Image (cartoon, helix red, strand yellow):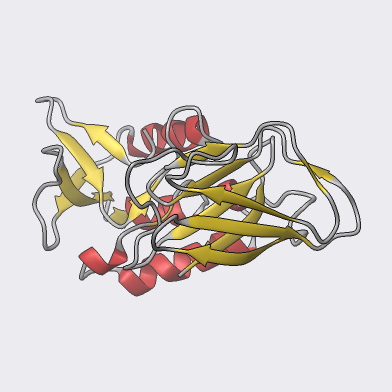
């Protein structure tokens, strides 16, 4: 896919410092196809950082294709966002600069919805009945049907049909048995830092928040 490749001997390599959309998510096919196209016919080398493998046994590497850092290229073109930078020692600033470029130019996963700026984060509660609360600050009623709420590790909540009126709020719980809930048995929003993506029914970005 957009952040993992398989070598001829079957070894899987997970690209360090980035996270691309998973199957079924907005821009998954584009990220996968770009990575495949970009690597084709090039001389490839793998560069490691602090950790050799992840919990799934995949090699953790930066991929250099004809001496170009593919991890950076994917982020700069909006095929992936930065991920777990606290676990790497190389290319941190370069990855962040690449992401800022993609965001400011609305490339790939950073393409903005017409509702961008209409929904704001009002509260994020990270203990007990963990939840996230949003508020509609535009003077219109917005149907949230098929909107998605994700963290950077691809925990996902899909909204049913629900009209969020001007100045009203909606709360999505992590583990509470409510209509709007991830229904997870664990906390989602990492206290060491996480990212929040709210996307409309077309996958376009409505709100992004990183802490």
Number of on-image labels: 0
Residue 183 relative to residue 191: left or right: right
Residue 152 relative to residue 66: left or right: right
154 is higher (above) or lower (below) than 16: above
Indicate the quadrant where residue 85 lies: bottom left
- Which part of the image, by quadrant, shows the N terminus? top left
Residue 168 relative to residue 141: left or right: left
Q: Residue furthest bottom?
A: 93
- Which part of the image, by quadrant, shows the C terminus? bottom left
**Frontmost residue, 100 versus 170:** 170
Residue 148's spot in the image, x, y percent? 59, 40
Residue 24's spot in the image, x, y percent? 50, 27
Which residue is painted at 14% across and 61% down in the image?
49
Which residue is painted at 45% across and 47% down in the image?
174
Residue 170 relative to residue 178: left or right: right
**Frontmost residue, 161 versus 117:** 161
Residue 65's spot in the image, x, y percent? 28, 47
Residue 29's spot in the image, x, y percent? 49, 29
140 is higher (above) or lower (below) than 57: below
Which residue is painted at 13% across and 25% down in the image?
10
Which residue is painted at 32% across and 47% down in the image?
186
Indicate the quadrant where residue 55 lies: top left
């Amino acid at each position: 896919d957009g952040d993992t490749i398989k070598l001829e001997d079957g070894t899987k390599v997970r690209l360090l410092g980035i996270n691309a959309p998973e199957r079924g998510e907005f821009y998954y096919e584009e990220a996968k196809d770009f990575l495949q196209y970009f690597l084709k016919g090039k001389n490839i080398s793998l560069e490691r950082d602090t950790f050799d493998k992840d919990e799934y046994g995949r090699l953790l590497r930066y991929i250099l294709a004809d001496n170009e850092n593919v991890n950076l290229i994917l982020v700069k073109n909006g095929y992936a966002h930065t991920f777990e930078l606290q676990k790497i020692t190389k290319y941190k600033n370069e990855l962040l600069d690449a992401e800022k470029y993609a965001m400011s130019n609305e490339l790939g996963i950073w393409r903005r919805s017409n509702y961008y700026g209409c929904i704001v984060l009002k509260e994020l509660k990270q203990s007990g009945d963990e939840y996230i609360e949003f508020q509609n600050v535009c003077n219109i009623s917005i149907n949230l049907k098929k909107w998605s709420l994700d963290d950077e590790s691809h925990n996902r909540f899909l909204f049913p049909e629900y009209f969020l009126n001007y100045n009203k709020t909606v709360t999505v719980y992590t583990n509470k048995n409510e209509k709007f809930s991830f229904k997870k048995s664990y906390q989602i929003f990492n206290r060491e830092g996480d990212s929040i993506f709210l996307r409309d029914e077309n996958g376009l970005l409505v709100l992004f928040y990183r802490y």
